[in-house]
Amino acid sequence: MRLVMVMSVSIEHLRHLGALLDEELRYERESYQTMLSRGAMAGQENVSWRRYPVEVTGWQRNALEQLVVDVSCDEESDFEPGKAVAFFYIDNDGVTMRELPFTAFVDTATDTALRIALPNSTALNQLRSHTATRLVGVQLTLDVTSYNVMREALREAAGATDARLVRLREVLAGPDKPRFRSLPQVDLPWLNREQQRAVMRVLEAQDVAIVHGPPGTGKTTTLVEAVIETLQRETQVLVCAPSNAAVDWISTQLHRRGVGVLRIGNPQRMTDEMLECSYERRYAAHPDYPELWNIRKTLRSGTANGKSHEAQQRLRQLRHRQTELEIRIHDDLFSQASVVSATLIGSAYHILERRRFSTLFIDEAAQALEPACWAAITRSDRVVLCGDHQQLPPTVKSPQAARDGLAVTMMQRLAKGKREAVSLLTEQYRMHRDIMEFPSRWFYHGRLRAAPMVADRLVSLMDTPLTWIDTAGCGFAEREGGGASRLNSEEARIVVHTVRDYIETMGLERVVADNVDFGIITPYRAQLRMIRRLMKMQRYFRRLRGQISVNSVDGFQGQERDVIVISMVRDNDEGQLGFLGDLRRMNVAITRARMKLIIIGNSETLCRHPFYAAFYEYIKECGQVIRSGVNAV
């Protein structure tokens, strides 16, 4: 009886996740229809996510025999590699827009053209049939592929009969405790004490291990060592992350250490360094590929066709040889790889079908939807989660799904409920101790400590590491900046003035010579665009173009700068904070700074929230608060 009760806990959890996915998809569908209804009339006027009409200028096949078509696109748009698109035409009534019955994906995008991957030859025939008689357009569409992958993974885990997957399910979604084995200590003297303990915990784990890496604590360094040490005991592991950028980052670090990496995914979404590790690039570089290409060319051209017995025999021989070469190349690529890397959704890609891995490493696990994690877990015998659930959360669009638990990640849940699996890294190598101390108290129970080489590091010995430029009483006011975004144009001007004034105080020549770099962070897109525009208008900043970055909080995830300036934007009598109420995002913003952090914002609006009130008092104590937004730093 107890076994039935235990099993029902995990299965019910997985079914609940499935229901939340359905709600998220419903919300996305409604949002997509709203976007269409607000778009140009009948699709005939271009908006950023739609082009009409377009010209299909040709088609070809890539190394994996995928069909791609070239489409004219005369302006900058929202079409990016990997995004789902639909072709459409205008019905005879001149008003009704009809989408062709298939979903395609952007392969490459430039200012003048798109290359779009089609799902099959039927889609190509449908597209050619319509372009022969009428004008067609292309627009971004809702991609349900990831939802299908996640749903299938949840179903597979819930219905598992394989003993290993059942055990994982009961540890990761049920009440079973993680198990660990005893191993001889591995000597890694280049790691600090906590990092070495984390690597050992990964090696000892039989089910799950969690590496919790707060900002600057060497999470990636620790994860790389854990992968390398695991490969001393296993032949191949799977490394995943929720985004292509995160997969490329950890894969690059492993590749630079001499680990053989096979990167699965869309090459157009990979960094240049990772391209040489991509499945497609290595497939095309295989010694047998020229023969395979010639066979494919012969079969497509029809020159091997014929009704005679000899022609039919020749055709069978070519097809048999084609299959033989495809299998051989595929197997060679995997046999040569120690690490196979992909996004969590990409781990369900057909070329990984029926492959199982002894260990799965998930980097940035605290940003991953739990259903996406299960897509990779179903291919694995044990799991290592690495990240920080006090930083950026996953993106959940439906407020209802978020409230009901979809925004709670597997790492966040396990870090609370299976603490014996968690290794916390506590020594950080990025920030001055005063910048570190407040987020350490608020998010990490005061357990972080600054490494000696960064603890007292400043841009200038005459400077302080923390400054709050308080715009309360300046008469600034936020306003709508388009959609849900907010804009505070006067504050944006203060930001630009503050950066220039700080550079002048240090000396422009010294800033250039020492390559001091600056990051300007704001949570709102409208404010981001305004600051970028103001920066471009000033010739003064041209010499510093490579040393100043302006981006959102998400855009700075995983990055750091010598000097960080944060534009808080919100300035209202009601104390409304919007995005600023997500304190994990503010944790990310604050902890990007190495030596200097400057906050620009209205204390009267912000300090109604206990976090900002405490932070304001902390800066008054350890840094400086300036009540003038004009003569800033």
Image: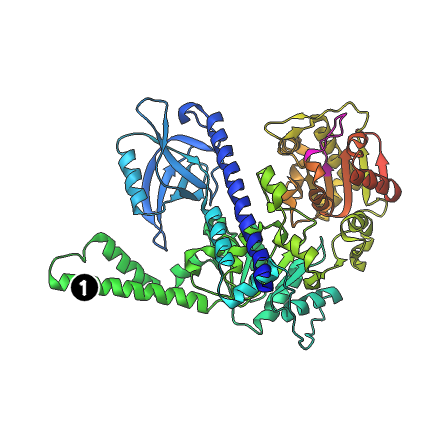
Image mark count? 1
Most extreme residue toward the front is 1
* Quadrant in which the N terminus is drawn: bottom right
* Quadrant in which the C terminus is drawn: top right
Left or right: 173 in relation to 119: right
**How does the figure colour the protein chain or chains?**
rainbow
Numbered disc 1: secondary structure: helix
In terms of image quadrants, where is residue 86? Answer: top left
Q: Residue at x 69, y 61 (%)?
A: 422
Give the percent coordinates (x, y) of residue 444. 77, 53
Q: Nearer the viewer, residue 563 or 265?
A: 265
Residue at which label 1 appears: 314
Specify the principal SS of the magenta part.
loop
545 shown above or below 429: above
Left or right: 326 in relation to 547: left
246 shown above or below 568: below
Give the percent coordinates (x, y) of residue 478. 70, 26
440 shown above or below 287: above
The part of the chain drawn in magenta is: 566-578
Give the percent coordinates (x, y) of residue 431. 76, 51
Give the percent coordinates (x, y) of residue 64. 37, 55
Q: Nearer the viewer, residue 465 or 19?
A: 19
